[in-house]
Amino acid sequence: MPREKPGGFSRAAPRENEFVEPLKEKGNMNHPKPHSNEDSALRRRRRLTGAAFAVLIAISSADFAPSEGALGSEPARLAGGLSPRPQITSMTVSNKQVTINWTGFSGPYKIEKCPGIGQPWTQVADAANAKTAALPLEDGLGLIRVTGPAPAYTGAETCQECHAASHEDWSKTAHAGALASLKAISQDKNPTCLPCHTVGYGLPTGFKDEATTPYFAGVQCESCHGPALDHANKPTDKSLRPVKTLSANVCGGCHTDAHHPTFDEWEHSLHAEVNEHTAEYFKSATGAARMLSCGACHSGSVRMAMLNAKEKNKAVVLPSGDEAATIGITCAVCHDPHVKTANGSQLRNPVHSNQAFSYNTSTNTTFAAQYDANLNICGQCHNARGATWKDTGRPPHHSVQYNLLTSTIGFLVSTNAPRQSAHATQIVNQCSHCHTHPHEVAEPTENNPNYTGHEFKPTLASCYPCHIDEADAESKVEATRGDIKRRIQDVKALLDQWGTTASDSTLRAKYGPLAWEYNTIGQITDPTGALAAGGAKGPTAAEQNVVPDEIKQARFNIYLVEHDGSYGVHNTKYAQDLLKVAADLVKAKLAPPAAKPASAGSGQSGTGATAAGN
């Protein structure tokens, strides 16, 4: 709550039209001379907000009817973080009127219209603090804009009063020292750099220079959460609370361009979106159940809900289906924006671990019960999702990379430790060494930018110096992948042969070469999905009971290697071992049982017959 300073001076900030005398002060009319006993944080909270900020939208005629939420579903991407401007979030048309909703940090807001570009603006209704308005839909309505006061920034010192722990954590991060990093390279006066290294640079109420506004130096709370003066003055008013969003656009306004194209690369990665089918699941009638099973890795908003619940030891409050379906694995899901962690780059989890982990999505466990903060950041999701060789419904999930790399999954008949490739044992940073291997170019341009690794595609530049050069690495990669693909096809041929010649007669007649498959056949049998589209299935749950364990173990191994996706590059020797075991298991089921010789001279023909029959 705002409290009074010595002498009874209230910390509440007056609105623009409440100031009369101070506006006569010589100098910037929007910045009255501070009271003599005010501290620096209080002075910033008394800054006036004079300039109007606007968002425009065009309405052409009465037949305009966009779907709700089609506009402004993501915050605008802006150098400096979260845009402080009002942003239209939805428009709906009914009964010859258009209802407009928007977001904003401080009112009063004005709705204005004009018939076309270059025409004068006319205020439609009285200014108000509400963030919605219904207007008559007239032909030729033209352009509509929402305007509000200039952003009312206050600075991190004010936030510290209520959020001391978060402020302390933030003060140790690189964001807090963002202006100092510019000073170190003599760029602290560069107007191109300052928007991303200070709060509100270029705006009438933001950073001017270090001498005038030192309290806005660095990337602060309001860079990512929006201007917070009104919230500081009325902390119990929920409508004034700063924004909390997982949108990568908040980071993307600064972590972009040829010099540091982190956002640009991430935007082209699979992390940037929720898989189409999974998104539909989240929005369906069974969305909550789907979120609890798939959401921990397929939706950034669901994962963060689970992490927050575990941290606070509370029940998970799931996001809406639309939010779960929209927010992918964004920056803040992997990087803690508030804390300088021990993992580097503010990563929530380390980049190396060796412990076994397979996130189980069954209903008899929870995210909180399984979460391991010390597990490799990539392994948190890129694991087998609880799969075992006894499963019959479908092949292992397409995410088993961590388990293959660390040799912590698969069926081996030997009691000896599995063989390990150098990739599994000698690369300290494991996945991130190859998949987020950054490199710079001499003169970065849009056509030849630096690389931060956030497309998550492995680069051969990471193979040096273990391999002589990129050409040497490429030849070994191709040789390894070719060898493993051949071995996979060899095992599949054996499994097909078992299905058509040695499987249970009922299975053989009904399924033929599919007799060895899971009920939902996988991509080894059906690489294009054409069979599944035609309704093809493997043995039912009941019929799976007559599929020998050895065949189940073999198919489990072959699908693990296939779904790892690297075709042996992650852990060559282990992939070879899994496929060799699979081949041996199937071969043993193909060979006819050896007849046992009758006991010589026993005279008991029944014994010999029984032995032969076993």
Image (cartoon, helix red, strand yellow):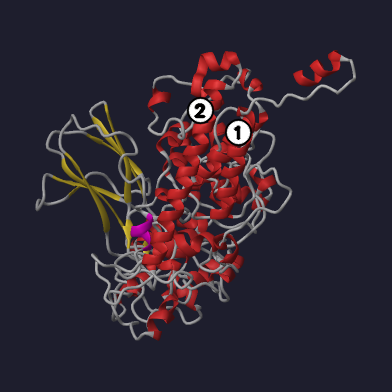
Q: Nearer the viewer, residue 490 or 145?
A: 490
Going 62% across and 52% down the picture, which residue do you hit? 407
Magenta segment, which residues? Answer: 262-266
Hey, which quadrant is residue 274 in on the image? Answer: top left
Around disc 1, counting alpha carbons within 10 Å, would you say few (fewer than 14), some (14 to 19), or many (20 or more)? Answer: some
Q: Main secondary structure of the magenta part?
A: helix
Instruction: Find out whether residue 284 is within the magenta segment.
Output: no
The residue closer to the viewer here, 74 or 363, is 363
**Residue at image point 64% right, 37% down:** 388
Q: In the drawing, does residue 585 fall left or right of residue 200?
A: right
The residues tagged by marks 2 and 1 sit, at their Cα atoms, a distance apart of 12 Å
- Quarter holding the C terminus is top right
Asked whether the residues under the numbered discs 2 and 1 touch, taking CB atoms below 8 Å apart as contact, a structural biologist would say no
Q: Is residue 167 left or right of residue 549?
A: left
Q: Which residue is mark 1?
A: 587
**Image quadrant containing the N terminus:** bottom right
Residue linked to disc 2: 496
Residue 381: x and y in percent read 55, 48
* Residue type highlighted by circle 2: Asp
Q: In the picture shown, does residue 212 fall above or below 79?
A: below
